[in-house]
Amino acid sequence: MKKGIDDFKMSLTDALELPLDVALDLPKIILVGNVKINITNHKGIIEYTNELIRINSKIGMIKITGKTLEIKNVLMEEITVNGFIDKVEIIS
């Protein structure tokens, strides 16, 4: 049942030419080099240290590892992280 609803949403999104992140509430991740990452449509911060940040999202946990990581901006739907980013993983 859920698969059918997801397929319908994808078809409708394509037909109306809507952005997937907006229409399906998916996270949008923008990585600027290895020094900045913006994540929109998040569901909250799970863990935050200088070397690890874990963020909840609709598709699973977004895990950011690196050095001197710092959350610069937290809004209702957007998080900005600065630092030296080594890896970004999505764990479903």
Image: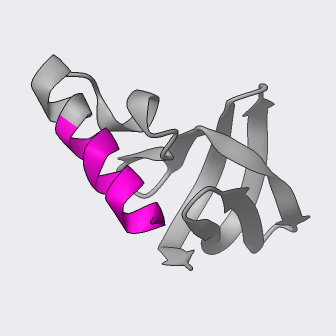
Q: Nearer the viewer, residue 2 or 89?
A: 2
**Measured from the top left, where is residue 76 in percent x and y?**
78, 26
Residue at the spot 61% in from the left edge and 69% down from the top edge: 60
Boundaries of the magenta span:
1-11
x, y (%) of residue 41? 60, 38
Predominant SS of the magenta segment? helix
Relative to 51, is 84 on the left or the right?
left
Q: Is residue 41 left or right of residue 79?
A: left
Residue at figure coordinates x 45%, y 66% from the top left: 1
Quadrant for the C terminus in the image = bottom right
- In depth, the one of 40 and 25 nearer the eye is 25
In the drawing, does residue 7 fall left or right of residue 32? left
Residue 13: x %, y % from top left? 24, 31
Q: Is residue 68 left or right of residue 2?
A: right
Q: Is residue 49 one of those drawn in magenta?
A: no
Q: Quadrant of residue 59?
A: bottom right
**Residue furthest bottom in the image:** 91
Q: Position of residue 88 (x, y in %)?
A: 49, 71
Q: Is residue 65 above or below residue 14?
A: below
| Corner quadrant of residue 74 | top right
Quarter of image, res 84: bottom right
Residue occupying image coordinates x 68% and y 29%: 77
